[in-house]
Image (cartoon, rainbow, N blue to C red):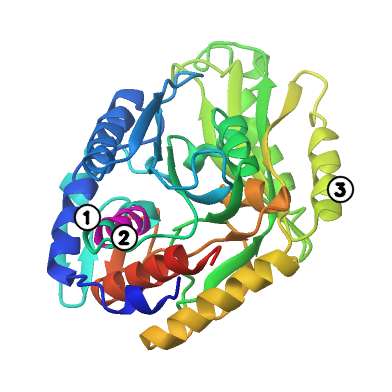
Amino acid sequence: MSHAAALTLPFDTDTILEGLKSWAACESPTFDAAAVNRMMDIAGRELALLGANIDRIPGRLGLGDCVRARFPHPSGETTAGILILAHLDTVHPIGTLEKLPIRVEGPLCYGPGICDMKGGTYIAVEAIRQLLRAKVATPLPITVLLTCDEEIGSPSTRDLIEAEAARARYVLVPEPARPDGGVVTGRYAIARFNLRATGKPSHAGSRLGEGRSAIREICRQTLAIEEMTTEDCTFSVGVIHGGQWVNCVATHCDAEALSMAKRQEDLDAGVAKMLGLRATGNDVSLEVKRGVTRPVWEPDAGVMALYDKARYIANAIGFDIAHQSSGGGSDGNFTGAMGVPTLDGLGVSGAKMHTLEEHIEIASLVPRARLIAGLLTTLGA
């Protein structure tokens, strides 16, 4: 099957944008399982209407469900096919729509999670929709896996992702395009850490000197951690929770830290540094635990062959795509590290992800949807 069929599919920018807006309007922060499940309901129904066989996979660890959609194919379900891997959770808490309303301003459309990554997920579904309407057969069966916890490192879904990838011949990840419109052929390794400082309580008004503040300890550790950053391995602290009463010296303070490196050996060294942290005083204790980890994904011949096909299709559509290894992990870390040819960053162009200015470039909707359709009609041919 040639990619030529994808070049003539009647994608419509306005129609895609309206559908995407409805997805962005369903707020789905990772830690709100009910909210994520409402989004899974919407996406699962759309995929079912397209004829997919839908599996609703119950969530665990207090997180939301996942949706797996398998499209019937003449070769049967045992044939290794194409896995479209995407997440529907976002970093934006419920109520963000009040501060970041869905709106069009010139060439941009704003909204929570609209770029990372509801935009890419929606155009992947739209690519399948247009292929089905045009009765264009794909050489390989297609499975769509929508997950619930990518924004926190996929602690409840990594096993599911790897199990599906093991059955796939290719993995396509519609995370946002790179700033230059390019795609991702590798990602850095990432490790997360949970820290807890325990101090000594006292009354902050009358017995301040008797206390030992856990908050102060975490503040000291935060400075020390971030000062460990080098070109090879970065360290940052993104979450701190401590204390209950302003008139009490805090007994406990918790923090979450992140380390990222281009090479696995550099991350391993960074992990050793983090686990080797010690309290700065005898009256305060510090505990450091390693959290979820994303392995380094380095491009191999299979990945580059997949990229070459994507670039050829993009050129036929009328644009070019560069490739790069990228920071900021995705579930492509897992599938790429397994050796399954994976292409990431296939989603829409946009910027300001994870902020109150998150937006997409509306003009990228149709070309990127057409690129995904072209890959679906070409891979395995």
Q: Is residue 131 left or right of residue 157?
A: left
Residue 58, position in %: x, y? 42, 20
Check disc 3 and give the amino acid type: Ala
Above/below status of 373 relative to 278? below
Check disc 2 and give the amino acid type: Ile
Say which mark, if any, is on residue 269: 3
Above/below status of 217 relative to 9? above
Residue 125, position in %: x, y? 31, 53
Closest to the observer, 369 or 65: 369
Task: Return the disc, 2 or 3, that comes first in the chain's sequence.
Answer: 2
At x 60%, y 15%, the residue is 251
Q: Which residues are magenta?
A: 120-130
Q: Nearer the viewer, mark 1 or mark 3?
A: 1
Q: Are marks 2 and 3 in contact (CB under 8 Å)?
A: no
Predominant secondary structure, magenta span:
helix
Instruction: Say which residue label 1 marks.
Output: 20
The N terminus, quarter of image? bottom left
Task: Farthest residue to the front: give it.
Answer: 74
Q: Nearer the viewer, mark 1 or mark 2?
A: 2
Say which mark, if any, is on residue 123: 2
Q: Are marks 1 and 2 in contact (CB under 8 Å)?
A: yes
Task: Return the disc, 1 or 3, that comes first in the chain's sequence.
Answer: 1
Above/below status of 84 relative to 166? below
Mark 3 Cα-neighbour bin, 10 Å: few <14, some 14–19, many ≥20: few
